[in-house]
Image: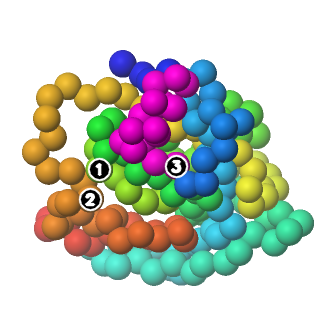
Amino acid sequence: MILTDKEILDQIEKGTIVVKPFERKCLGTNSYDVHLGKTLALYKDEILDARKHNEIELFEIPEEGYVLEPDKLYLGVTFEYTETHSHVPFLEGKSSVGRLGIDIHATAGKGDVGFCNYWTLEISVKQPVRVYAGMPIGQLIYFEIKGDVEVLYNKKPNAKYNPKANVPVESMMFRNQF
């Protein structure tokens, strides 16, 4: 079941959902709008290797915006820091963003119960488009869970994306054994 606006507010009051900064005007009927942070990243290498640490180069979006180009994978970050202690958060793009041809995640739209961090965005575009820091970029939807969680994500010793980062974080696939 998806949480409604009233239930999201109740859960924020209880502390099971945290959004910083929280702005009431960003609360939709059953979602919360998040915004593009000021930092983007590109991988340094043209060819990425799943077994190695692929390094990224961070840069800030200038005041006049930044033009994203097709055939490139940009990593972005949400302006908002979030915590979700009793629900499964899903990050989806806003329809207005999709209508500009911007995809905000390739595969990683679902968070885990216990996720406490900024969201790294996997951004790609269909045609060149100018983006701005602070623009609405996505919406968080919260789902109820059934049953108890054995280990929350932020308590897992092997969780690859636990360190708090308000900048995009590159793939940590290389830490997997395969």
Three-letter code, disc 2? Asn
The label on residue 154 is 2
Question: Whole-Å distance between the Cαs marked 2 and 1?
Answer: 5 Å
Which badge, 3 or 1, comes first in the chain's sequence?
3
**Who's the residue at 42% across and 22% down the image?**
2
Left or right? Give the position of 165 relative to 157. Answer: right
Query: Considering the numbered disc 1 on the image, is that residue within a helix, a strand or a loop?
Result: loop
Which quadrant does the N terminus fall into?
Answer: top left
The label on residue 19 is 3
Question: Whole-Å distance between the Cαs marked 2 and 3?
Answer: 16 Å
Of circles 2 and 3, the one toward us is 3
Query: Considering the numbered disc 3 on the image, is that residue within a helix, a strand or a loop?
Result: strand
Three-letter code, disc 1? Gly
Nearest the viewer among 64 and 44 is 64
- Label count reads 3
Three-letter code, disc 3? Val
Q: Which residues are magenta?
A: 5-19
